[in-house]
Amino acid sequence: MSENLKIIVTGGAGFIGSAVIRYLLDQTEHQVLNIDKLTYAGNLMTLAAVKDNPRYHFLQADICDRSAMQKAFAEFQPDGIMHLAAESHVDRSIEGSDVFIQTNIVGTYTLLEQAREYLSTLSSATAQAFKFHHISTDEVYGSLDADGLFTEQSRYQPNSPYSASKAASDHLVRAWGETYKLPVVISNCSNNYGPYQFPEKLIPLMIQKAINHEPLPVYGQGENIRDWLYVDDHASALYTIFCSGKQGEVYNVGGHNEVKNIDVVNTICDILDAKQPSTTLSSYKELITFVKDRPGHDMRYAIDASKIASELGWTPRETFASGIDKTIQWYLGNPDWCGQIANTYSGQRLGAIA
């Protein structure tokens, strides 16, 4: 693959998207166009370290805006796209699904059509070198029992409005690859965590609430299990797939770190007890509070990431122990970023329906 590609990254001001852009600008010589609508979860502070890089370009636009996407493709002349723009929080999808349908389904359709139109203007060889990389989630597969792993052959069984919208977008991408021969690749990842994550998600929410000595709300009894993937590991996996993934293939990306939610919270408390002991509590664990479970809460996710390891040579570098320590250290060291986010989200519960 060329050392000087032009890559569109959608949702590049979000948590995973910004990690991908930082990776591309730090580790490669590629040019990047970040297309982001800047919703509540989009934050350009995540890209402060690269905003002055001459290879970085930013366009504030909605991926559902056909004319804006057409103009972006025509002017930037990309060699590929890494599509991460999505509404992603399950609780918010329970509370209001419309924006998930629009962004995740209609937005993906709009990008597929604009990519198809753009490729029609290129030579056959140049068009075939293009890649449309759609980044999705393991939640499209539904829930696992105590045994087994999600593989690329697992059947789709989404259980939330969020996962259903992502499943639909996966199917659109696959169909455009089959019907129109658009050069596509799909990846489905496990739960990400790390620096710059919006604190509606479990790990940053627990860190922030603990620091503020607020109750730590754990759904049900905290027995739900997730496979945790450090975001910088995910960024390297996505670039590997973008460069070397085979057209039309699906790659599952996991961290090999299955942990119960309650154990995640206990680990966060243990690390904070050591790094920043409370002056009023013997342990932050005193703040743990069990609350009514999320509607349709999937019990267990676990990824079989053997395909990306055997075919593309990628494996995660971080264990959960090393990744969570780095994550907590980052949040403790970046109070300004955390304070700005607090102005838009105070940690209230979302998606609690009767």
Image (cartoon, helix red, strand yellow):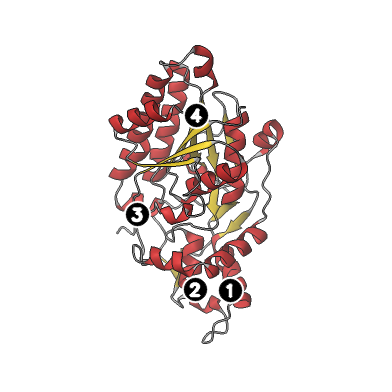
Q: Which residue is mark 4?
A: 80
Tag 4: Cα neighbours inside 10 Å, few (<14), some, or many (≥20)? many
Instruction: Determine whether the residue tagged by mark 3 lies in a helix, strand or loop.
Output: loop
Q: Nearer the viewer, residue 64 or 291?
A: 64
Distance, label 2 to label 3, CA atoms, is 23 Å
Residue at 50% x, 32% y is 6
Q: Which residue is mark 1?
A: 272
Q: Nearer the viewer, residue 282 or 334?
A: 334
Residue type marked 1: Leu
Q: Is residue 148 above or below residue 264?
A: above
Query: Would you identify the image quadrant in which residue 24 lies?
Result: top right
Q: Is residue 272 above or below residue 309?
A: below
Q: Nearer the viewer, residue 212 or 114?
A: 114
Tag 1: Cα neighbours inside 10 Å, few (<14), some, or many (≥20)? many
Q: Which residue is mark 3?
A: 40
Query: Would you identify the image quadrant in which residue 241 lies?
Result: top right
Residues at discs 2 and 4 in contact (Cβ within 8 Å)? no
Distance, label 1 to label 3, CA atoms, is 28 Å
Distance, label 4 to label 3, CA atoms, is 27 Å
Camera-side mark, 2 or 3: 3
Question: Between disc 2 and disc 4, whose residue precedes?
Answer: 4
Question: Between disc 1 and disc 2, whose residue precedes?
Answer: 2
Distance, label 1 to label 2, CA atoms, is 8 Å
Rendering coords of residue 258 (x, y %): 62, 53
Q: Mark number for residue 210?
A: 2
